[in-house]
Amino acid sequence: MAIVLKGGESGKGNSICLPAKFISPFYNRLLRIPKSGHIIWHKDKPTWRTHNRRDYSQTIPKSGHIIWHTFSIYVPYSPTGTSAYVRSSDLNQGKKLCRRDEKTVADLMEGLNLGGLSMVIAGVSSPASGGEHLISHFLDMVAYREEKSPFSRHGLQVGLGTLISSLIYERLKVLSVDEVISRLHCSEPEYEKAEDFFAKRGFDVRKEYQKKIQVLNLMRENLPSLWNRMKKEAFTLTYPAATIKKVLTEAKCPLRFSEIGVTRELARQAIMYSRFTRSRLTVLDFADELNILQGVAEDFLSR
């Protein structure tokens, strides 16, 4: 469990305290953190701070402020960016993965650990689970409802979702603020259609659906003012669809839903409706609210 501490040594910003057991043994060695220790990350500084258990209990009162007995050590990673940023050198390792190269597999496991750490820090799964995962979850829901085995392994389904997400980002990147405003005004969300789709198939997503509608209303209201910042800070972290396709190909992953036994219609439904299975915003929401998701789905499924 992540403990959010208000304040910090400077009395400004927030800090997050994580028990050391959440960090992989590799990082315990790197930071020389005793098993009884805690890691504290300050959002406004690229450092980690550690406490041993004794100091932790003595120096953090109920108010949550860190007062003393801390020291800093630099870690060459951005905790919140671990799942959004991938080193370019890691993108060309598909063939080595297929050969079960030890170092490549170790690097992959390190990336998974960092993704897990980012989720613990955030307190939600969003940093490592976006629209690509919702597509996979949707397929798993269908398989479960039909009392069938999953269509494929989780990673292979997410790989297809990642390819779709990359196509969406390519279209979002070129939109100006004026185009965003125009598309929001021209689009007429068919939320009831999605609700009816799930109800007819016996999927109980009402709780998440109702939360999502509230979030979407806020998103539509605030998206224009945030658009340029999103383009600068978020969209620049994404890779082109051609790069994602090359990576998946080298790792011998499927590039079409038909390769994992998913029909064209079910694939279309997964792309169009999976966003309503979770309340968090993903790229699928931006795409559909800006009236480009259907076009992406048709283009992808026509290949």
Image: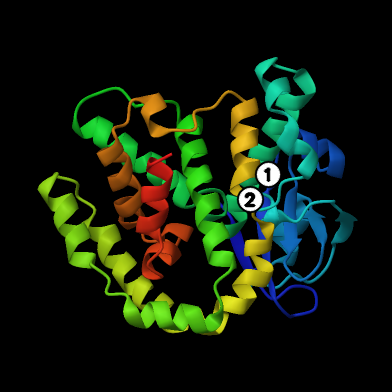
* 1 or 2: mark nearer the eye: 2
Nearer to us in this view, 164 or 118: 164
Q: Mark 1 points at which residue?
A: 114
- Disc 1, SS: helix
Give the Cα distance between marks 1 and 2. 23 Å
Judging depth in this view, the residue of 102 and 177 nearest the camera is 177
Residue 41, x across and y down, in percent: 74, 60
Location of residue 246 in the rendering, given as x and y in whole percent from the top left corner = 64, 35
Q: Which residue is drawn at 41% across and 63% down?
A: 292
- Quadrant in which the C terminus is drawn: top left
Q: In which quarter of the image is residue 43?
A: bottom right
Tell me: residue 49, above or below residue 112. below
The answer to whether 163 appears left or right of 96 in the picture is left
Q: Position of residue 74 (x, y in %)?
A: 88, 55
Q: Residue furthest left?
A: 200
Q: How crowded is mark 2: few (under 14 residues within 10 Å), some or many (20 or more)?
A: some
At x 38%, y 50%, the residue is 297
At label 1, which amino acid type do we have? Leu
* Amino acid at dot 2: Pro
Residue 88 higher or lower than 98, as above or below: below
- Is 241 on the left-hand or right-hand side of 129? right
Q: Nearer the viewer, residue 6 or 164?
A: 164
- Of marks 1 and 2, which one's residue comes earlier in the chain? 1
Name the residue nearer the viewer: 302 or 2. 302
Residue 238 seen by the camera: yes
The residue indicated by pointer 2 is 240
Q: Is residue 189 above or below residue 136?
A: below
Label 2's element? loop
Q: Residues within 10 Å of mark 1 (few under 14, many from 20)?
A: many
Residue furthest top as drawn: 99
Q: In the rendered image, which quarter is residue 40 located in?
A: bottom right
Residue 20: image quadrant is top right
